[in-house]
Image (spheres, rainbow, N blue to C red):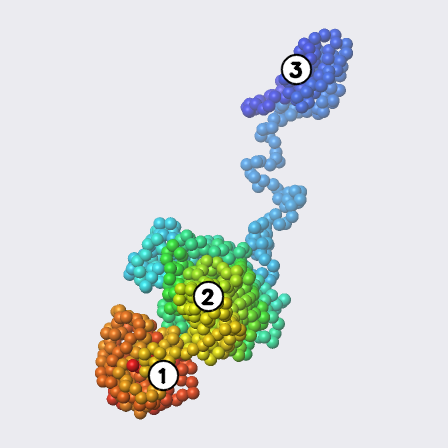
Amino acid sequence: MPSVIVASSGTSGPRGNSVLNGSGAPSADTGIDGDWYIDNATPSALVIYGPKTAGAWGSGQSLGAGNALLRNNNLSDLNSVPAARSNLGLGGAAVLNVGSTANTVAGGDDSRIVNALQKTQNLSDLPDKAAARTSLGLANSATRPVGTTSNTVAAGDDTRFTAPDAWVFDVVSYGAVGNGKVVADAAMTASSATLTSATAAFVVGDVGKAVQVLGAGASGETLVGTISAYTSGTQVTLSVTAGSTVSGACAMWASDDTAAIQAAIDAAAAYAVAHSGAATVRIPPASGQFYGIAGGLKTGGSTLGNSQLTLPVYATTGRKITLSIRGTSSGAGVQHWQQTVPNTTGATLLSFGIFASAGAQTTSINAGGNPSVLGGPSQPGGYGIAPGVFSNLYVDIGNLSILTAHSKFGLTYSAIDLSGVANARLQDVAYSTTGTVPGGSYVSPGVFATGLSIGVLLPANGNNDLTIVENVTCGGGYTYGIVVPEHTDIYGLRILYCWAALCPAGSYYSSVGAAHSINATLVSIEQCTFLIYIFGPGTNGLGPTMNLRIDTETSVPRFGCRTSGTGLAAARGRVTIAGLFTPANLTLDYPTGLHIESAQLSYPVTTKTSNYTAISFDEDILADATSGAITITLPTAVGRTRPVTVKKIDASGNPVTIDGAGSETIDGQLVRQLFGQWDYATVAPSGGSWYVKAAPTAISWTDRPSEQGLLAWTYDPNMAGHVTAQSNAGVAGRITLVKIPIREQITWSSIWFGLAGVDAGASLSNCYLGVYDSSGNLKGTTADISSSLMSGATAKAVALTSSFTAAPGMYFIAMLLNGTWATNSLTFKASGAGVSVNAGLTAPNLRYSNMLTGQTSLPSTLTLSSQSTSIINTGWASQWYGVS
């Protein structure tokens, strides 16, 4: 009998198909798909159903009489067994038993099977692996490892597949890691180098990274250093000790990516020169929160600038090179005022540069130009200056955010300096210091004026007629938000928390003067001391020219000038101010040629019932003198471009007086009056005075000293609409002289002066007024008037210790002050005349002059030929005096 090998039973599989039977047709729940069914209700007439498909049996088929196989016969009643096996597809092995001899078949686990591959060998038992690979259709790449060298294959995520086009240079490919981190719970103790943070998750690998801690430096400045030692996930040691104790502070740290990003810039620049003249530096979002820029300033050298990341210099005789520096998504988002950390969304560069003092900052600027994170050649290097020297480069910066270390004194770096390149565009860009509003970083923007930081400098005047600012945000922390030259188009600019926001440049450093315009569709300015701050006059004393629409929130919209008024006076164009502001508080530090409009007024008409000083927005003033005579004082005519109309609208006999600012005249007279109802005068500015364009009725008059009970005066006190002030360092111990004509003989007993402001905290002594004749002889003096200067801001008369008879002629009233007082707090009424007060005069006949130093009393004689103007031209001039 043949042997039978019985294998151990395995897990039962699913039921196979069967032939079922029963009396009657099968029901739907009988059997499974693939089964057959025989209805044997009538044995002589069997009916077969199947196979069951999709749960349905279908119609039955009659088997007919005598042709049916009987179940109990177990297929023994087949007509042909071999034919049946053939029909079932069974081979010869189907009739053989399992065994190990001839005419048997081996079991599946028969150990006698030879030349079979064993699964435990994992195909290592193949005799010819190469033939096997060929049989499987595999090529030679199947045997090569993944790698980046020859005889390797690249992985599917190989960065070489995702690398940009040949003209795109990704900073990550050059080694930038962008692993910056920021926390808002940093703490340090003064004189300690320990930094703690519960949320920092410091690691050993943080050692050597640059770090800055907001407010932990001396005087609350940002502390900048490196991480020198790791203690735990919540504590590290810095390379510098804190100068101030802080808690809940913002701390930021990162590896230095300066060299890697510079390498990408250099490679892009080289490609642009060698190929199409254009290339792109790509800055993807950082793997952490930002890219650290901790490298030093590169001053001078081949790039002739003063920046951490430098731009190349190209001769203007060659073709224009276009260099794009771009992130992947907009960086212009505005930091929310409740954020406890700076904005680091998208591609962000964070500079760790800051100056220790204003002197160090000034030295750096003078040596190399404005220190910046990203910059081209600058003025000390010979670029951005007259007659129009620029690097022939178009810099296109977009989708980028640049942060500079916050300095409460404005001693941080510029974000971008493009003043020496020919063309520039900033698109979807933000720049800011690392301060926060909740942290108090921007409470006092005026303090930023201690330094000279400029957020962004655009190509200087004389540029190549292409400067675009589009959707740009200045988050604040700078002395000057942005310096804007001619040929600039602005399409959406926001400036927050700067001392001076928008700085149109008539001239900058040694640039040519602006001759072309600046246009802005909308500039939003908030929490800045100055809305507009002019950098110098333009070409031939005119410009910068601008057409601006400003939206702001400020109680005091203010315009200033970096060149003591010459730039603001030379500025031309139209500025419309919208938003939440107080029109009456518009402050012009100096007269201006700008046409300034208020969007709050549909037409600039105002009605006044009492004395009123017109503001820059005023054009038509309706004066109602029903309750008494009123005076309308005009704004200064210097630099003004629009006329002013004053109309008397009441029927009373009270006059309406139109008075020029200071000593400015109206058709040569100090005032003009309106007496009848509906009388008016339209006056237009010209050359610093006013002329009447239209006036149906006007009567003018001029005061004389006698009409006010005085014997003489230096000028009509109505002209003393300004104040003169100086520091005690500039005035104390010096004798100030004001010339006064005496037309007829008088007895001189007292001197009148206008005390405009007092300093209650001043310490004064040895203060005198006196009179000298034209030969320099002291004719009379007062006692010490120190007490009179300590209170009562009003017109005052002080008696001479002895009266004297003054013959007709020229005299000089002398003032001597000694002591200490707060600068610009002790003030005297004056006409406001500046450097022109001595026009046409020389010593000993100067109208306003100063002499000697270190005096504690008035000397008996003066050598008038030694008259000086050393403090006169700085504002200590044109004081008003009267004689009685």
Quarter of the figure that contains the N terminus:
top right
Residue under label 1, please give it: 848
Amino acid at pointer 2: Ala
Instruction: Report the number of discs.
Output: 3
Q: Nearer the viewer, mark 2 or mark 3?
A: 2
Helix, strand or loop at disc 3? loop
Residue under label 3, please give it: 27
Compute the Cα span from label 2 to label 3.
115 Å
Q: Nearer the viewer, residue 757 or 513?
A: 757
Do labels 3 and 1 touch, CB within 8 Å?
no
Residue 284 is left or right of residue 106, and the answer is left
Quarter of the figure that contains the C terminus:
bottom left
Amino acid at pointer 1: Tyr
Q: Residue at x 63, y 43 (%)?
A: 128
Amino acid at pointer 3: Ser
**Relative image position of residue 203 (x, y in whole percent):** 39, 52
Residue 719 is left or right of residue 95, and the answer is left
Q: Nearer the viewer, residue 678 or 533?
A: 678
One can see residue 424 in this view? no
Which quadrant would residue 633 be assigned to in this image? bottom left
Residue under label 2, please give it: 651
Q: Residue at x 62, y 26 (%)?
A: 106
Q: Residue at x 32, y 63 (%)?
A: 219
Query: Mark 3: few, some, or many residues within 10 Å (few <14, many ≥20)?
Result: few
Do labels 2 and 3 touch, CB within 8 Å?
no
One can see residue 86 in this view? yes
**Relative image position of residue 727 (x, y in whole percent):** 32, 75
**Relative image position of residue 605 (x, y in whole percent):** 50, 63
Query: Mark 2: few, some, or many residues within 10 Å (few <14, many ≥20)?
Result: few
Compute the Cα span from label 1 to label 2.
45 Å
